[in-house]
Image (tube, rainbow, N blue to C red):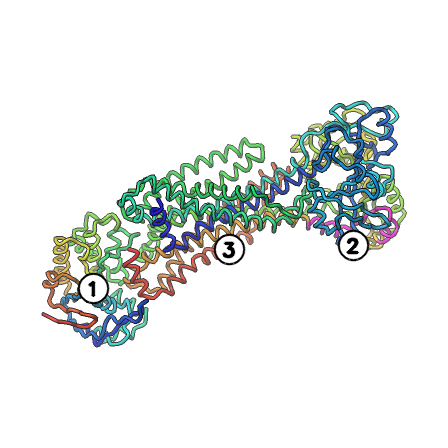
Amino acid sequence: MLVVENLHKSFVTAQGHLAVLRGIDLTLEAGVSLALMGESGSGKSTLLHLLAGLERADSGRILVEGVALADRREADLARWRREGIGLVFQQYNLISSLDVAANLAFQARLAGRYDPAWVTHLAERLGLQALLTRYPEQLSGGQQQRVAIGRALASRPPLLLADEPTGSLDEASSEAVLALLLQLVGELGCSLLMVTHSERLAARLDRRLVLHHGRVAAVSE
Amino acid sequence: MRLCLLALLSHWRRHPLQGASILTGLWLATALWTGVQALNSQARADYARASAVLATPAQAQVLPRQGQYLAQADYVTLRRAGWAVTPLLEGRLRLPGEAGGTLQVIGIEPLSLPAGSQVAGQPGEGVDLLAFIGKPGQAWIAPDTRQRLGLPLGETMPLSEGLQLPPLVEQAQLAPGVVVVDIAQAQALLQVPEQMSRLLLAGTAEPTLPAELADRLRVQPAEGADDLQRLTDSFHLNLTALGLLAFIVGLFIVHAAIGLALEQRRALLRTLRACGVGLATLLAALTLELGLFAVLSGVLGVASGYLIASLLLADVSASLRGLYGAEVAGQLSLPAIWWLAGVAISLLGALLAGLSSLVRAARLPLLALAQPQAWRQAQSRWLRGQALLALGLLVLAAICWGLGDSLVSAFVLMASLLLAAALLLPALLDGALALLARRCRGPLSEWFIADSRQQLPALSLALMALLLALAASVGVGSMTQGFRLTFSGWLDQRLAADLYVSAPNTTQTQLVMDALAAQPGVEALLPNWTLDTRLQGWPVQLQGIVDDPHYREGWPLLEQQADAWAQLAAGQGVMLSEQLARRLNLRLGERLTLPAPSGEQALPVVALYADYGNPKGQALVAADWLRRAWPEATLGSLAVHLAPSRGEAVQAWLEAAYADAGVRVIDQAGLKAWSNQVFERTFAATAALNSLTLGVAGIALFISLLTLGHSRLGQLAPLWALGLGRRQLAGLSLGQTLLLAGLTVLLAMPLGVLLAYCLVAVVNVQAFGWRLPLYIFPGQLLNLAALGLCSSLLAASGPLWQLARRQPADLLRTFAHER
């Protein structure tokens, strides 16, 4: 479903040209979950952003169902983010002006795939039924993360990209949130690419890929 | 304390725009307030100088019964009879050259000045008599007048016909546009030998004139308050009101910026408190920080205020000259005290604008994170409080409307209305958005409205400023335009004669009248007899007119009894100008008592007419009746109706025949053009101040949006990540600004019309004595609405341009920094 070939990305910084990704190759089949690991600055988040169409690569290719992401115009990239993926950020990035119910349904409605029954089911599974009329700032970190996961899954995306979704949660909460995430991904049958520092969490996913200084250091099943 | 202050100040390095907005707000508020105050105080200082040209213990004065002058011989007779009188001769002197201008000449006789008199602010005893009355004498002049006219100091100045002005000597306290000379010099300059204008009587007593003089002279009793001060009070109150409005609008900017800065510095305040900084130290540091802004803005504000005042001074001088005949110097002075006052007003403004933020800082639950929704919800409690306050203000406005009968109550009415509307605005906008939210069906439209409501607390003050400025523009614009329309129509009716002739005295005017009667093509000659008197302390001009169909057909009346003109012609009625009727509280049918020398005369009021732009009250009576009751009434002007196409010829003949006799002729078109020019200049300063206020409101909105723009990026970034394009986001953002500004503009229009109604029906009546019809100009409303929307669009364009130009990577970074 997703193929990455020889992907390069660098940034201009005050210190000069900084190469963050130096030729990444990766394949992710439908329904498979992949943990993306590596030390800070190894390029995990940059790779995730490139896959999400939030940034453009310097060279190399990202093929989605055989179509290169780099060839797409900005409007098509926006559609890709809207319809092709679900994004979960470490800092949740909920919309502060909308309540939980509206946040949950937002992307699904944007993508034209709003299914009230599925969203209700998600809210139940994520334990958000009692919080639907609250605003993001009135929720705890764990609750906000669950809303972010629900929002990402509400549009039934074929690919879920998660950037340290449990990074700001304690260990027990992390376990619980990940378990829920994996169950829901399983129910949907979508692929999952998750950036994490945690070996323990990574162990629960199908595969793992370790980055080191912008290169693939290890791949394991 | 130092560390705490440094930590607080570090915020402005990251948010220079916010700092600039506080500075700009205080700077503009101080500048406009200082500018208006500078104009007012300059004018008032000049009135004081005018009244101090010759300040004597004299109260009553001796005036000629007929004509402009009394004979010097009569003065001598009075002095010999032991009367402590001192003479005065006044007149205007035209300076040579095309752009010469005129000076008011005042001739005094320093030897007879009563003890304790002051001349040009100096004790009369201190006058160097030999230099002043000897040869070549002295001509005292104010430094600003001398500089304005470019006259040489210490040298005699040749005038026309072999005359010359004595060497000019500067007197700092002298009124602008005035030159004081010895009375003998004045008689020569004004070409009225052995003549005097009036005699000032020492003391308050009103002695009886000797019988041989009583038929030529009369004693006028002491007057009350200074006329100029009294007449111009309303004009200055108008300026002050506009200055105050601009000041308040400027403070709105400051309030918005300080509030936002506090919201963004919650985390910093929390950290400082956590590090052991006491609340008192923190509040002191915040106050000190505000003080630094205020001092800097105050100094900038005073400098800019003086610049604004110096730019507007010419228009204000023209207004005062046109409306009240008051002379105001063309130069501003900048005493040191003004710098201090400017900084003080800036400090006061900063304190007013920042007080609520300081109170909130003291009460902040410091462990809570920045919560826009909590801010919005806290704001809704404020909104309820504001709405209650607004209702209270509306009640106050209703009380002023029903019971008020002074200019102050009229301004309280307007201020209450404006403030109530401004306070209600956020609640009304929130309500309108809530209504719209119910109709939203799509996710984007729901977000659009919800996000607009979330932005409202940060933008409400700027929107209030926009509402006030637009409403003031609509109000003042409608009033000015309506006045222009009314004035123009009124002029067309009132100035129906083809030529207007004025001559120096009654004899001369009668000679001209007789000569004109023999001219071919002269259809009617309407002599205008006048007499100046006082009624209930107000200066009033009685005008005696002859019975002529031109008056009946052309003189516009506001209210009249049946046969009003016939009653007037028969000497059985009087017509009053609208402002005089209001001042004397007289209505149609009531009797006006006039203090004629032969005894009081009472006439019924048979009609009221408009007399726009005249600070004096005016009463129309039959010419014959006036001359019988007041033999000293003078004939100074004539209105001449001519056969078609005879205008130029008769004018040319008059000018050729009487050029040297001081006869002035002006045709209808010239007089109308001059009147319209006076009108335009009269409102030029008001219009300029109004535009400046609108500009300040535009800046308020611009700064608020720009300040908000940076934090908005954090709100917009998730939407972009969820699949909205940057252009789409920019469009939505623009739509939000336009929606809020559009709703504000919609509310500003009826408020402006209400304001216009208050101006024409309440303020004008109290200030000038005349009521104008209310005109609504749809084109003007549309123009202002478009201007309001365009300024909002312009204000929104900066942040939008930033958003549209942002690289995706910048938006990504907002996840890390702004969330």
Give the residue at x 71% y 42%.
B171
Q: Residue at x 55, y 54 (%)?
A: B779
Q: Which mark is residue B97?
A: 2
Residue B804, x across and y down, in percent: 38, 64
Residue A33 located within the stretch drawn in magenta: no
Q: Quadrant of residue B183?
A: top right
Magenta-highlighted residues: B652-677
* Residue linked to disc 1: A40
Describe residue B6's horizontal placement relative to residue B650 as left or right: left
Relative side of B764 to B297, left or right? right
Element marked by disc 2:
loop
Tell me which residue sits at (61%, 51%) in the image.
B311
Tell me if B563 is positioned left or right of A82 in this view: right
What residue sits right under mark 3 in the picture?
A: B787
Chain letter for the residue marked with disc 1 in the picture: A
Do the dots labelled 2 and 1 sit on one chain?
Answer: no
A57 shown above or below B132: below
Give the position of the C terminus of chain B as an image quadrant: bottom left
Q: Earlier in the sequence, mark 2 or mark 3?
A: 2
> Mark 3, mark 1: which one is toward the viewer?
1
Mark 2–mark 1 contact, CB under 8 Å?
A: no
Front position in the image: B363 or B660:
B363
Distance, label 3 to label 1, CA atoms, is 53 Å
- Whether residue B344 is visible here, answered yes or no, is yes
Per the model, the C-alpha gap separating discs 2 and 3 is 45 Å
Residue B519 place in picture, x, y as percent: 88, 49
Q: Position of residue B29 (x, y in %)?
A: 50, 46
Callout 3, which amino acid?
Leu
Q: Position of residue B85 (x, y in %)?
A: 80, 29
Check disc 3 and report its element: helix, strand or loop: helix
Q: Residues within 10 Å of mark 2 (few under 14, many from 20)?
A: few
